[in-house]
Amino acid sequence: MAGKRRPFGRVRKLPSGRYQARYVGPDGVLRPAPDTFRTKREADDWLADMQTELRQGDWRDPDAAKVPFGKYAVAWVNERPLAVSTAELYAILVRVHLVPTFGRLAVADITPAAVRTWRRARLDAGTGPTTVAKAYSLLRTIMGTAVEDGLIRRNPCQIKNGGTVTTPERPTATVVDVFAIAEASQPRYRALVLLGAFCALRWGELVALRRRDVDLEAGMIRVRGSVSELNSGKRIYKAPKSEAGKRSVAIPRSILPLIAAHMKQFAEAGADGRVFVGAKGATPRRNHFNGLWHKACEAAGVKGVRFHDLRHTGNTLASQTNASTRELMTRLGHSSTRAALIYQHTSDRREREIADGVDAVIVNALKRRPRPEGHAGDTKG
């Protein structure tokens, strides 16, 4: 039976008894509906919906969304101006956690149910909750771009809090704990432990420090960037993610003599000399240091504390000085886009006042600490 002409599109009855709707898209291509219809009325209604989409500018090329997710995701990562370490992380998440499930599926065929099933399967398979949260967040972002590209109408990633993970609160090392760990550490790493805690510096920021960044006379450290380790073992120097990461941090006065002694004995010569150098003359590697850290913690009798937890110690001490939230954010190198606040640097004078407050806590804690008979931890570097 010949299809009946109509103002928009065509409907024809198939030998099966079902009805097929077709229309000419803006690209001049005759496009059939993705499914056939039980009645002619249903086919007419579908065509009416398509005509409305065309008039309102909401039409999407149905062929565009047929691109495989794997191909689209790889292109998504490659086309973005990401930091090397971030690009490496995203590539791993795509290859290991997303492509095995979604790689061959068309972008348009990924449904909310499929996403929920995938996430549950990853968790049941023993993948860490943090890794699953990161993979889900990346999937949601990629599919969000697909919405912007007009490939799909709605993001299938609709799991509430799917990109977040609740972790147990980390322990806070006390001032006494910090000094005990530092004293049990190899001499070349004692200053690293003290600055990690009392200046709340990140590992990457510490090993990136150069002699020119440490002003002993002013008692200030200038954070200009950080060192990041890739899975390949390659280390790269990178600028902070935001302006908040570039900051001056005051050193508590009570540890200045220890930092000065470190600079004299272990830091490389010259303004560009590295502040922290391994026993063999290389920039310390995190994995190697972690082994030394665990040994020092065991010797000091401190359990369950990671090196990164020292930042929490530093934040806790600084918060006890009546520093404002913005001042704490400045000292830690945090920024808050969510609060839509204009970032402002804390003045060096106020930063010194905060450090002096931290110093008072340190001094008081050390006064109450039982003094050992001998000096602990003089391990060979």
Image (cartoon, helix red, strand yellow):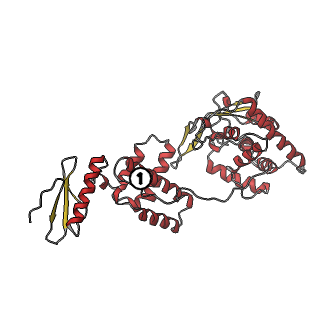
Residue type at numbered disc 1: Met
Is 311 placed above or below 2 here?
A: above
Rendering coords of residue 251 (x, y %): 75, 36
Is 327 placed above or below 90 here?
A: above
Seen from the viewer's position, the closer of residues 78 and 34 is 34
Dot 1, crowdedness within 10 Å: few (<14), some or many (≥20)? many
Location of the N terminus (image quadrant): bottom left
- Residue, disc 1: 143
Seen from the viewer's position, the closer of residues 341 and 355 is 341
Is 248 placed above or below 317 here?
A: above
Helix, strand or loop status at disc 1: helix
Seen from the viewer's position, the closer of residues 345 and 174 is 345
Rendering coords of residue 338 (x, y %): 57, 44
Q: Is residue 137 left or right of residue 332?
A: left
Rendering coords of residue 341 (x, y %): 60, 38
> What residue is shown at x 77% (from left), y 45% (from top)?
317
Q: Which residue is outermost to the left?
A: 2
Q: Is residue 339 left or right of residue 99?
A: right
> What residue is shown at x 52% (from left), y 69% (from top)?
124
Q: How many marks?
A: 1
Which quarter of the picture shows residue 255? top right
Rendering coords of residue 83 (x, y %): 50, 41
Evaluate whether residue 261 shows in this view: no
Seen from the viewer's position, the closer of residues 100 and 322 is 322
> What residue is shown at x 75% (from left), y 54% (from top)?
297
> What residue is shown at x 72% (from left), y 58% (from top)?
304
Which quarter of the picture shows residue 96? bottom left
Evaluate whether residue 143 shows in this view: yes
Location of the C terminus (image quadrant): top right
